[in-house]
Amino acid sequence: MAQCLKATAETIGRAGAAIREGRLVAFPTETVYGLGADATDDQAVASIFEAKGRPRFNPLIVHVANLQEAEKHCVFNAEAERLARRFWPGGLTLVLPRREDTALSLLVSAGLDTVAVRVPAHETARALIEAAKRPLAAPSANPSGKVSPTRAAHVMEGLGAAPQLAFVLDGGACPLGLESTVIGFPQGIPTLLRPGAVARDEIEAVLGRPLADANAASGEEGRASPGQLESHYAPGSPIRLDATEVAEDEVLLAFGPDAPKAKTSMNLSASGDLTEAAANLFAMLRALDADAGGGRIAVMPIPMTGLGEAINDRLKRAAAPRA
Ligand code: TXA
Ligand code: MG
């Protein structure tokens, strides 16, 4: 079993050493918990895929300390730099061309000529990058296809037994609770590859133009992030979306003040606050899944404004037919 340790200067130091030895460390970020490895070590990066049981190699996000570090690995255009200056550290990932002289493992790009980079804001994530003295490749710390972890206990539940995982650093609940927004630049056009913790309109306000949609863009590069499988973020119980009433055998994931009556229910945000709803989403899906007892999870409609776009994206994938 991996050791689950409260994040302190001492435990982060030990975790940094484990990273340099090629082992995996799960750590909190402001979005979700990440499963981290030395991004310059092919073996270590390969062991991420092994631990998660990923069906194939999806490209991974590389976490670095600041923009200057990011520039060692990829080539920024003017718009990417503007977004980095505004949103880093924070929940935004930029997909950019790899620099020829980068020390990053080719496996983090999974055969593409781009690399996804992000500067996390969470204190523990930042301290771990510093202690490891390496860029950290880190997908969400859940078995492939399952709900992303927003608490250390979720990581232990899903990956605690993975032999590659040395430590889980416990830094409490992730404040944003949704994965980062992923932006790429196919044919130089800023494109939303994955909606996430930073809302589309905030990004468009900085760019002064609308973001293109991944699936509308043409060619390989324009496809939605390769990691965006249809069925994803899936709890064990079936999910029914846009529910306005609740059946006998259903538990309810509610939103807003007008929730229908149900035997078992949790409310993402009784006041209808989408930021609060994002932070609660994955933890409540897990809790309701445990209570569903073979029944379904009915989910009330969530508006598409602001973070609602990312919340609806995750719910749609959680509800998609399983492979
Ligand atoms: O908030 C987050 O982003 C979390 C924390 C740990 O940082 N990480 C995360 O990683 O969600 P993961 O592996 O679960 O999702 C990474 C996403 C996938 O959709 C993947 O396809 C996309 O980023 N991605 C990574 N590299 C890419 C690339 N070179 N081109 C296109 N998409 C890429
Ligand atoms: Mg993930």
Image (cartoon, rainbow, N blue to C red):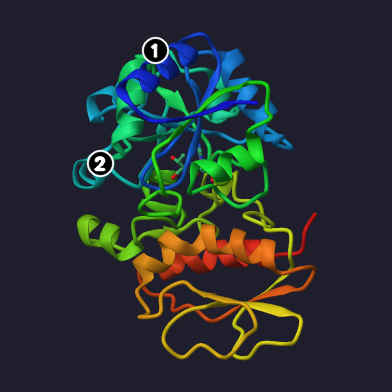
Give the percent coordinates (x, y) of residue 283: 52, 58
Q: Earlier in the sequence, mark 1 or mark 2?
A: 2
The answer to whether 181 is drawn above or below residue 159 in the figure is below
Question: In the rendered view, does 160 fall on the left or right side of 90?
Answer: right
Question: In the rendered view, does 18 fall on the left or right side of 183?
Answer: right
Q: Quadrant of the C terminus?
A: bottom right
Query: Which residue is found at the position 43% from the left and 75% from the top?
Result: 304
Amino acid type, callout 2: Trp
Query: Element at badge 1?
Result: loop
Residue 281 or residue 225, whichever sits in front? 281
Question: In the rendered view, does 272 fall on the left or right side of 76?
Answer: right
Residue 153 or residue 241, whichever sits in front? 153
Amino acid type, callout 1: Asp
Query: Which residue is found at the position 22% from the left and 62% from the top?
Result: 205
Q: Which mark is residue 88?
A: 2
Give the percent coordinates (x, y) of residue 245: 63, 91
Q: Residue furthest top?
A: 21
Using the rendered view, name the quadrant where residue 76 is placed: top left
Identify the residue under disc 1: 101
The answer to whether 169 is drawn above or below residue 247 in the figure is above
